[in-house]
Image (cartoon, rainbow, N blue to C red):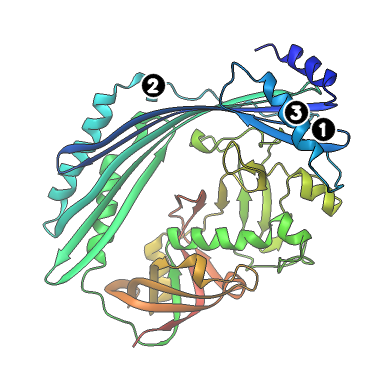
């Protein structure tokens, strides 16, 4: 594609500045059920999203036909003429320096599909054999995505990054007497050879069987350990108050708390877009072409920064933090994060239970979107877990509700474990011991 010619043509049509965002993706999806391949699909997507400034207004357009993108310029001019607001618009000229992304693995495209199908079929068989209480394997699936993003604009910026990731997923049903429980586990990798089938299968089975024969806990306040997956989901809610758009629009509890305590001094939260242990999370620039960088968001309980894209950084009178990302290639640029890391503590999960002595482990919560107010932090969530008695995990607990205030809870962190996991939501964190949590049960 002759971009120089396109930029010249854009000028002739009255587009003073032009930006092209090109996203190419190849996706593979495999799902097996009862020794058969239930789903096998391959999809190739290539989309160009363009925006340009015409008479001080930003026009946008997109196309899936990259062989005929000149027509996009006419759409930009047309759409810009329909804009009535007078907000300031601009195209980013580029950051002074970018961290080079390591080469994405070729293992996904070099591994035949037959081997990926075999991995799923073998895993299904393994799941049934791990425990006689596994009554059903709801699903075993594998998905991979090979992607490329290119950002190029009339100011001379040209950026490209390739990413490759695979996701292996297993879901099981455990049954004992009349009690039926479900659970799942997953692995997200940057290299096909790194998929740990044994670990995923063992975790799915253990999580499901640990739920069996659960009872309600007595209603009272408990010393509580939050499992990594649970705390990760709460970190994502916590981040709403650090989102620069919410700060600017008055929807953040932390609006006036920069460089002040917002959590326990045991809590440190980092965004690491250059995480090299798993390149599936590596991003050298955001979707506005701004260089990403590793940053402390909360350091020993002190709020160090909000996160911004270009638009809301300008509204706040500050600099973007390289957190302008699209939810999809055709979507608008929002504010979001790459990989978030909660700094580990020094104790194992078992040592946290021993420190608690008498309390409860919460390892599953439901209804996060309906049960928690992201602005006030007040929450009431259905949950399940295990009792902690004599410093050890004992009976299963279910049909309980945990309630309180998210921000109060972050201030009540006593200790963190060293058992970090990465959640589906992109948060790497360990088990967390909090001083007190209200439980409603029997």
Disc nearer the start of the sequence (2/1): 1
SS class, disc 1: strand
Estimate the x, y position of residue 168 in percent, counting from the top left.
34, 40
Which residue is under mark 2? 109
Residue 155 or residue 320, whichever sits in front = 155
Q: Residue at x 59, y 26 (%)?
A: 161
Instruction: Identify the residue shown where x is 67% and y is 57%.
Output: 299
**Mark 3 neighbour density, 10 Å: few (under 14) some (14–19) many (20 or more):** few
Residue at the disc numbered 3: 97
Q: Secondary structure at mark 3?
A: loop
Is residue 377 among the parts visible in the rendering?
yes
Which residue is at a point 52% across and 58% down the rendered structure image?
A: 345
Residue 371 appears at what percent x and percent y?
A: 50, 72
Name the residue tied to disc 1. 53
Tag 2's secondary structure?
helix
Figure quadrant of residue 89: top right
**Residue 290 visible in the current orientation:** no
Measure the C-alpha gap from mark 2 to mark 1. 39 Å
* Distance in Å between CA atoms under marks 2 and 3: 31 Å
Q: CB atoms at circles 2 and 1 under 8 Å apart?
A: no
Horizontal and vertical percent position of residue 323 = 68, 44
Could you tell which of marks 1 and 3 lies nearer the N-terminus? Answer: 1
């Amino acid at each position: 594609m002759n971009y120089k010619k396109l930029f010249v043509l854009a000028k002739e049509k009255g587009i003073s500045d032009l930006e092209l965002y090109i996203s190419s993706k190849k996706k593979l999806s495999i799902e097996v059920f009862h020794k058969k391949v239930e789903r096998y699909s391959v999809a190739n997507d290539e989309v160009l999203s363009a925006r340009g400034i015409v008479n001080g207004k930003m026009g946008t357009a997109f196309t899936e036909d990259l062989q005929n993108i000149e027509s996009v310029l006419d759409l930009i001019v047309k759409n810009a003429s329909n804009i009535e607001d007078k907000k300031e618009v601009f195209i980013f000229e580029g950051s002074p320096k970018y961290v080079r992304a390591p080469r994405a693995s070729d293992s996904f495209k070099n591994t035949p599909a037959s081997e990926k199908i075999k991995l799923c079929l073998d895993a299904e068989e393994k799941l049934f054999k791990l425990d006689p209480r596994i009554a059903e394997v709801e699903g075993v699936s594998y998905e991979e995505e090979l992607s490329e993003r290119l950002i190029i604009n009339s100011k001379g910026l040209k950026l490209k990054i390739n990413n490759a990731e695979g996701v292996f997923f297993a879901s099981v049903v455990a049954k004992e007497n009349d009690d039926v429980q479900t659970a799942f586990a997953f692995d997200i990798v940057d290299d096909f050879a790194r998929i740990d089938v044994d670990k995923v299968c063992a975790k799915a089975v253990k999580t499901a069987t640990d739920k069996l024969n659960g009872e309600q806990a007595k209603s009272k306040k408990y010393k509580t350990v939050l499992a990594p997956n649970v705390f990760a989901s709460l970190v994502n809610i916590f981040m709403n108050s650090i989102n620069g758009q919410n700060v600017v629009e008055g929807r953040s509890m932390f609006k006036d708390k920069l460089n002040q305590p917002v959590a326990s001094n045991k809590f440190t939260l980092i965004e690491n877009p250059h995480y090299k242990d798993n390149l599936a999370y590596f991003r050298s620039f955001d979707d506005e072409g701004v260089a990403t960088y590793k940053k402390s968001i909360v350091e020993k309980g002190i709020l160090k920064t909000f996160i911004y894209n270009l638009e809301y950084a300008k509204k706040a009178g500050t600099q973007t933090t390289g957190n302008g990302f699209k939810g999809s290639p055709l979507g608008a640029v929002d504010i979001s994060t790459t990989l978030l890391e909660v700094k580990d503590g020094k104790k194992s999960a078992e040592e946290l239970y021993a420190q608690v002595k008498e309390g409860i482990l919460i390892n599953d919560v439901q209804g996060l979107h309906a049960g928690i107010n992201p602005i006030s932090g007040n929450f009431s969530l259905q949950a399940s877990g295990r009792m902690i008695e004599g410093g050890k995990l004992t009976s299963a607990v279910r049909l309980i509700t945990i309630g309180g205030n998210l921000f109060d809870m972050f201030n009540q962190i006593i200790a963190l474990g060293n058992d970090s996991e990465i959640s589906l939501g992109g948060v790497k964190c360990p088990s967390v011991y909090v001083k007190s949590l209200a439980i409603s049960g029997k």
